[in-house]
């Protein structure tokens, strides 16, 4: 009978250990999920900032070309031609 009691005690101890480990892992999992959410928000914020900076950079390149810089004249001409085409398209749409 004492062998059965020892086996039961051992099982109870191991089950308690497993339950404790499961709780610890669940807590760790929640912390990791929170960290992942924070990281995703940071990445999204940085992506938005990168896009804004790219747009600002392109605008500065065009402004620099308009001020007389020879570096980006081709890009500026292409952008102006694109804008003219858009304006022509709008005028055509309005006249129909």
Image: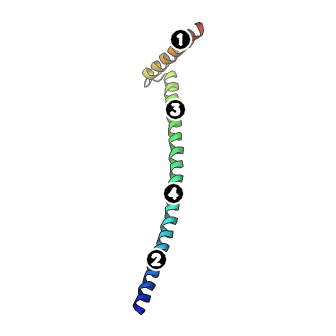
Q: For residue 11, what is the image quadrant?
A: bottom left
72 or 11, nearer to the observer: 11
First in sequence, mark 3 or 4: give its number: 4
Q: Identify residue for label 4.
A: 33
Give the CA distance from mark 1 to mark 4. 52 Å
Q: Residue at x 52, y 44 (%)?
A: 44
Q: Residue at x 50, y 14 (%)?
A: 85
Instruction: Give the number of the disc on residue 13.
Output: none
Give the CA distance from mark 4 to mark 2. 27 Å
Q: Residue at x 44, y 24 (%)?
A: 72
Give the CA distance from mark 3 to mark 4. 33 Å
- SS class of the residue under badge 2? helix
20 or 94, nearer to the observer: 20
Give the CA distance from mark 1 to mark 3. 24 Å
Q: Identify residue for label 1.
A: 88
**Label 4: few (<14), some (14–19) or many (≥20) C-alpha neighbours in 10 Å:** few
Q: Nearer the viewer, mark 1 or mark 2?
A: 2
Q: Identify residue for label 2.
A: 15
Q: Identify residue for label 3.
A: 55
Q: Is residue 32 above or below residue 62?
A: below
- SS class of the residue under badge 3? helix
First in sequence, mark 1 or 2: give its number: 2
């Amino acid at each position: 009978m004492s062998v059965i009691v020892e086996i039961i005690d051992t099982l109870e101890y191991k089950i308690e250990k497993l339950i404790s480990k499961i709780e610890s892992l669940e807590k760790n999992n929640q912390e990791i999920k929170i960290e992942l959410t924070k990281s995703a928000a940071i990445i999204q914020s940085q992506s938005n900032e990168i896009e804004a900076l790219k747009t600002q950079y392109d605008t500065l390149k065009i402004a620099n070309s308009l001020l007389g810089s020879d570096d980006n004249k081709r890009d500026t001409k292409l952008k102006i031609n694109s804008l003219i085409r858009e304006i022509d398209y709008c005028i055509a749409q309005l006249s129909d």
